[in-house]
Amino acid sequence: MAVAEANKTSIKGGEFLIKETLSSQIFIPEEFTEEQRMIADTCREFLGKEIWPILDEIDHAKSPELISGLMDKAGELGLLGTAVPEEYGGFGMNFNTSMLVAEATGAGNSFSVALSAHTGIGTLPILYYGNEAQKSKYLPKLATGEWKAAYCLTEPDSGSDANSGKTKAILTSDGQHYAITGQKMWITNGGFADVFIVFAKIEENGQTDKNLSAFIIEKSSGGITMNAPEHKMGIKGSDTRQIFFNDCLVPVENMLSERGNGFKIAVNILNIGRIKLAAAALGGAKRVTQQAIAYANERKQFGTAISQFGAIKHKLAEMATQMFASESASYRVGQNIDDLISTFQEKGMSDAESKLKALEELAIECAIMKVHGSEVLDFVVDEGVQIYGGMGFSADAPMDRAYRDSRINRIFEGTNEINRLLVVDMLLKRAMKGQIDLMGPAMAVGKEIMSIPDFSMSEDETLFAAEKKVIQNLKKAALMVAGAAVQKFMMKLSEEQEIIMNLADMVIEIYAAESVLLRVEKRIELLGADANKLHQDMAIIYLHRAVEKVNNAGRAAITSFAESDELGVMLMGLKRFTKIEPVNLKDARRSVADELIARNDYVF
């Protein structure tokens, strides 16, 4: 078996933290085919023709017909059926291609939210959990946009704790229907959806199920009312409502999957939503960066374009570098998902089972990228406002909308705080189940920090040898802190949320820094070193940023629980594991910024 093939079949979620990753395991955007690039271009052309010219009109629309009509146009181009198999009227694209579509359409502001809610959380529960009759009935109409979909999970008292929902489903006396009663809120596409994926707990003989069940409800079922659209800080054109189900009769055959399986459905669909959100955030960030570069080149102060000032170059280079890292990590996850899907299919699993199993396996990485992608977008739009200066604060300039619209992404698909907690929780649970060995390497690191440091010079002169050593040491830092925290708090670690979020920040930065380094390494394999000087600069810039963030998060965690000698030893270990050779980052940033400025575009 070839090395690349062996790596493909051995992917395990979270194992990157203890494993040396080979560049052959990573897919990079430069490897997309011409056909895939044409699909992305079609998406961007659609935004340019149908969405961007009327963003103000979309934001101020008095009814949902405008967004619904734009969804129809997207459906005509096939943009709503990219992930739907061909037998159900879609294109059956692989996961990474659907990620590319999410990125390309992610710059559509409110429209992007409507589209992703339909194609993602609105359609995928039926695709992955529906039986053949359900798929045949609903997927063809959802793929073309003839029917629009909405996802009804959140309730007034049930947000992050989704399984605490109070919506009830009671079987009718004839056994033919469930009567659904309850209130859902923050429902995207609620005002024009034809199909609702609704989560409720079945009540029988006065007893209510512990776990949710999921149902497909058609708007024509009756018993459905809704409030007017919510007034929101951003994504104002997205139709978001409270929806009330009042003895809404749903045929028993419209239950998705099995009774009590709704919470699992919700969790697995959120995994998809999280990684797709990272891709969409990337698309939005690229659009903002393009606008910021163009403005910086046009705006003159003291007789000079502001793009020529070092402070602005610093901002543009940091925007580009963080986006480059997020892009590298996002498509790394996407390809890992595709590889696992293939592996599970080869083992005899169905298409839907394979996809669900792959997404469940890589749930840690999906949560990592949701946090990273949404926070990179927020950083980019904030800097975009600053580059525009006073005009950035004007509602007549594009940064106003971008700034407001970006903020929801740190709340969508589980808040970033919840996702940080999930990253560490899933890692530790998998370690306790023996699925990945975290404690063995953590104990080894604990012994290493008590030993005499090795000051010998490495003889490895291969490309990025020193940088890879830095990555391995950052992993040791995270393992050291995690191991000590587990030993200190044991089963009560879940109560130490501040420490858990510090750990999550370490893990997130390690994954992103490793991904960008692997991407550049593979780019050099494909294109040569001379074509990648600026990309190498970005890899080094980001790695230094990651070292600083890992050090800060590690110090915050250690000083939260370690004392006396242990405190000193751990801080010494952290210092050892977060060392990196100093370089002139100012010149590296200026080189990156100069390329952006000269090309008047985001070019990486």
Image (cartoon, rainbow, N blue to C red):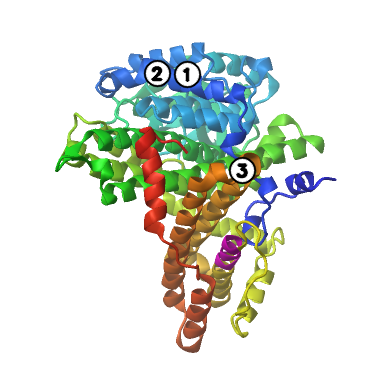
The kind of secondary structure element at disc 3 is loop
Residue 174 visible somewhere in the drawing = no
What's the magenta bit mostly, secondary-structure-wise?
Answer: helix
Quickly name the residue at label 1.
148
> Is residue 240 rendered to the left or right of residue 526?
left
Q: Which residues are magenta?
A: 466-474
Type of residue at label 2?
Phe
First in sequence, mark 3 or 1: give its number: 1
Mark identifier at residue 528: 3
Of the pair 309 and 314, the residue shown nearer to us? 309
Crowding at mark 3 (Cα within 10 Å: few <14, some 14-19, many 20+): few
The outermost residue toward the left is 302
> Is residue 545 rendered to the left or right of residue 382?
right
Of the pair 568 and 352, the residue shown nearer to us? 568
First in sequence, mark 2 or 3: give its number: 2
Quadrant of the rendered structure where residue 247 is? top left
Type of residue at label 1?
Lys
Query: Which quadrant is the N terminus positioned in?
Result: top right
Q: Residue at x 63, y 36 (%)?
A: 259
The kind of secondary structure element at disc 1 is loop
Quickly name the residue at label 2.
192
Q: Residue at x 55, y 33 (%)?
A: 99
Of the pair 60 and 400, the residue shown nearer to us? 400
Give how far across and how far down residue 465 sits, in percent. Answer: 62, 61
Q: Within the magenta stretch, is there residue 1? A: no
Crowding at mark 1 (Cα within 10 Å: few <14, some 14-19, many 20+): many
Q: Residue at x 65, y 32 (%)?
A: 257
CA separation in Å, label 1 and label 2: 7 Å
First in sequence, mark 1 or 2: give its number: 1
Q: Are marks 1 and 2 in contact (CB under 8 Å)?
A: yes
Type of residue at label 3?
Gly
CA separation in Å, label 3 and label 1: 47 Å
